[in-house]
Image (tube, rainbow, N blue to C red):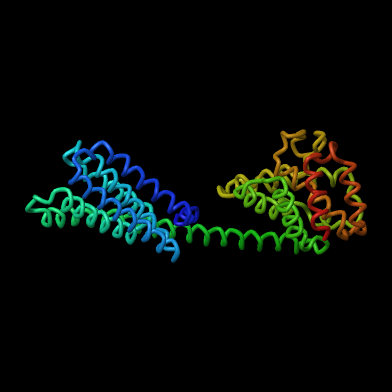
Amino acid sequence: MKNLSNTLTIGRVVSLSLLAFALWLVGLMPFMSEAQMHYRRLFALVLLGVTTIAFVWMLRRYRHLDYVVAVIASTAATLAYFLLYPILFDAEFVFVLTIIGISAQWGLKAGLVNASLSTLAYGLFHNVFSSGHSEVVVETLAIGGFFVISALIVGTLSHQREAALLTHIRLAEKLQDSYDATLDALAAALDARDRETQGHSQRVTALTLTIAREMKVSHEQLQQIRWGALLHDVGKIGIPDHILRKPGELNDEEWVLMRRHPQIGYDILKGISFLQPALSIVLHHHERFDGKGYPQGLKGESIPLSARIFAVADTFDAMTNDRLYRRACPQAEAVTEIRNLAGQQFDPAVVQAFERVLRHDPT
């Protein structure tokens, strides 16, 4: 929240203060015919303006930016009160509004600074411009007490809100870490079942995320892509070992069983609510861009983007690592093969992003 104040450079603070002072002078001009009283007003405003600029400069230098905002708000409220006082009997609300706003946005300390300065400005105004008022001090103390109480109430509520939000964020992060650790362990267990593909899930997940970032996928989607990539082969739990570990090519009957693993994986995970957006990879990572894939024969952009990205990463990792039925091929050969299949097996836009990734980091 306080990072918003980083945009307040010294030049901007001084410029805003000078602008406020110029507005004071403009507001004063119509009353200059009553010279003596309004010269006193002018003197008070000049003194307040110079003091404000000096105070803001000092606070800005020492980076107490929440207090800088409180000072500027008090100055603006004083100007508004000065302009409204001849028109409205109860113009003190302008101070209350700034106190509430500062306390809510910047916290209790800044709110108390704002309340104190507002009380000072209120007392100065009535002492200079209403010198005949016999109860100015008592009235100032009463108004000041109201200002301080307003800052205390709103600032305390704001602090409690921020503390609750921070607690919620920390709990969410812990829960996220628990999800990640659980899924990492599950992916490692799945890879361990097939010695030839150990580490595959972690490698393909890392490459999938890198391509997704290259394609400007949102942070929220990246988390779901990570989970989906880790669990993409969870359905192979339902595939017999003699098929899964067969050292040669699968026959037609075996391929029928093997092609069931995306649907099996989806059926296993579909009851887990937080994984719902991640299931597109689990179910669709063997679809083809030309519509000849499985299990649903989706075509083109009807295939979820996450699955299209994963398909490229998965194929590249499979081609560049040893399997039971073949040796790994060189990276350049794998890239050429994937490029040749753009528009058939793979989304051409994803292939282009994949090639950009490899140019940036060929390892």
**Position of residue 307 in the picture relative to residue 173 (left or right):** right
Which image quarter is the C terminus in?
bottom right
> Where on the picture, by quarter, is residue 80?
top left
Residue 200 position within the rendered picture, expressed as x and y whole percent measured from the top left? 77, 59
Residue under the image location 31 percent in, 48 percent down: 98
Q: Is residue 250 above or below residue 293?
A: below
Residue in the foreground of this view, choosing between 218 and 206: 218
- Does residue 238 appear in this view? no
> Where on the picture, by quarter, is residue 24?
top left
Residue in the foreground of this view, choosing between 91 and 237: 91
Residue under the image location 11 percent in, 56 percent down: 138
Q: Is residue 289 above or below residue 3?
A: above
- Does residue 266 appear in this view? yes
Which image quarter is the N terminus in?
bottom left
Residue under the image location 25 percent in, 59 percent down: 116
Residue 7 position within the rendered picture, expressed as x and y whole percent measured from the top left? 50, 53
Q: How many marks?
A: 0
Q: Is residue 70 above or below residue 266?
A: below
Q: Residue furthest bottom?
A: 62
**Position of residue 3 in the picture relative to residue 96 (left or right):** right
> Where on the picture, by quarter, is residue 362?
bottom right
Residue 92 position within the rendered picture, expressed as x and y whole percent measured from the top left? 21, 45
**Position of residue 110 in the picture relative to residue 211 (left or right):** left
Residue in the foreground of this view, choosing between 294 and 217: 217
Residue 121 position within the rendered picture, expressed as x and y whole percent measured from the top left? 24, 54
